[in-house]
């Protein structure tokens, strides 16, 4: 009886009642939003279409601003530094595309026989050990991959891409012009944002400053981590004699923009195309992948990611799944920066709340 009485008192306490009330309010809001999603969904689409160029331009300006500041120390002129960064960046992109597209296409053609042989080995292994026939699935994957790598398909895809690029060239130019303008007046934009934020809430500029610093640190840490991921992956496949070690390293570095999931996909592709190298090298590769994952997770990442921007794997996977469900691929990409922002805002709020209590 005492236990039941104590339990009843706990349930009927003010804290529990307030928590349940907040939960009911949250559920009611979610229900209303779900019921009226056709109305506000269209409105959000229109709003996003209007602010999209400014948002993308600001993101570009934000990412390249540390590099512009570094160059400005030497050239002593903001406009000149902005010109160096954007002209140099565009030149690098054009050069990489002109060099990378033929190399990637040729590498994919060379990799396809290994990929096809690896799929057949997997099919045979499943058939022998689990008595399950997946040959139809393997044939479908092989046919799809073969069609994609046919020269005519590749050329048609390339022309389709160029046609789409020409259609959207005006939008890209607008993004670029806005990004250059925002980079040139970045300090003034920051002051205007902080001034406007202060009118709404005196403590809001503190949040913005902390989030700004943390996101800059995240971008720097991500760049270092991606380079480390690409180099270690390339070395790993070079050691076992994989002929496409450089391509796999580049793919692993780029795919690391989606934490955990991206590098895993790169290694799955590497393992499948390494099946033709024999069981000894395959076993050695699995050991190297384990060593690389351990070093990246427990040595490199803790050094480049501070405690303020580091997130547990549970939250990272939650963010990736939620982002992909809501926004698709772009949601997976923006998941980490968004989670870092939420973490910083929560930390500052708790610090401010603690000060008020004290």
Image (cartoon, helix red, strand yellow):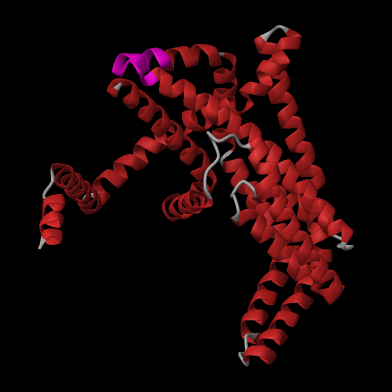
Could you say where residue 105 lies in the image, as x and y percent from the top left? 79, 57
Quarter of the rendering occupied by the N terminus: bottom left
Rendered residue at 61%/46% (across/down):
257
Rendered residue at 71%/85% (across/down):
125
> Does residue 84 show up?
yes
Rendered residue at 24%/46% (across/down):
39
Task: Please count the marks in the image.
Answer: 0
Figure check: 207 above or below 133: above
Could you say where residue 352 lies in the image, as x and y percent from the top left? 35, 23
Could you say where residue 31 lies in the image, as x and y percent from the top left? 21, 52
Q: Which residues are magenta?
A: 194-204
Q: Residue furthest top?
A: 76
* Residue 31 within the segment the image draws in magenta: no
Rendered residue at 57%/42% (across/down):
167
Figure check: 297 above or below 184: below
Quadrant of the image occupied by residue 180: top right
Figure check: 209 above or below 74: below
Quarter of the rendering occupied by the C terminus: top left
Figure check: 158 above or below 353: below
Could you say where residue 184 lies in the image, as x and y percent from the top left? 59, 15
Q: Residue furthest front?
A: 2
Q: Nearer the viewer, residue 162 or 68?
A: 68
Left or right for 125, reference 339? right
């Amino acid at each position: 009886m005492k236990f039941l009485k104590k339990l009843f008192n706990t349930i009927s306490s003010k804290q529990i009642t307030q928590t349940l009330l907040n939960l009911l309010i949250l559920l009611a809001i979610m229900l209303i939003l779900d019921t009226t999603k056709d109305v506000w969904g269209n409105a959000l689409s229109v709003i996003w279409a209007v602010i999209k160029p400014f948002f993308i331009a600001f993101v570009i300006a934000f990412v390249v601003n540390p590099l512009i500041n570094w160059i400005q120390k030497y050239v002593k002129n903001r406009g000149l530094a902005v010109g160096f960064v954007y002209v140099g960046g565009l030149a690098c992109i054009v050069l990489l595309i002109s060099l990378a597209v033929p190399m990637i296409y040729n590498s994919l053609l060379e990799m396809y026989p290994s990929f096809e042989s690896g799929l057949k080995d997997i099919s045979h292994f499943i058939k022998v050990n689990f008595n399950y026939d997946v040959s139809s699935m393997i044939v479908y994957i092989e046919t799809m991959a073969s069609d994609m790598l046919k020269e005519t398909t590749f050329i048609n895809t390339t022309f389709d891409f160029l046609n789409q690029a020409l259609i959207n060239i005006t939008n890209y130019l607008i993004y670029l012009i806005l990004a250059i303008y925002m980079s040139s007046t970045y300090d003034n934009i920051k002051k205007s944002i902080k001034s406007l934020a202060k009118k709404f809430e005196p403590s809001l500029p503190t949040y913005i400053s902390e989030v700004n610093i943390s996101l800059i640190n995240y971008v720097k840490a991500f760049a270092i981590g991606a380079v480390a991921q690409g180099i270690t992956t390339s070395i790993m496949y070079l050691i076992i004699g994989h002929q496409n070690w450089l391509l796999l390293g580049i793919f692993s570095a780029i795919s690391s923009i989606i934490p955990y999931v991206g590098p895993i996909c790169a290694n799955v592709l590497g393992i499948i195309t390494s099946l033709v190298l024999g069981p000894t090298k395959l076993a050695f590769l699995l050991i190297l992948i384990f060593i690389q994952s351990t070093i990246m997770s427990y040595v490199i990442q803790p050094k480049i990611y501070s405690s303020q921007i580091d997130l547990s794997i549970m939250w990272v996977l939650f963010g990736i799944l939620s982002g992909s469900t809501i926004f698709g691929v772009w949601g997976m990409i923006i998941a980490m920066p968004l989670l870092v922002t939420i973490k910083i805002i929560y930390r500052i709020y708790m610090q401010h709340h603690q000060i008020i209590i004290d």
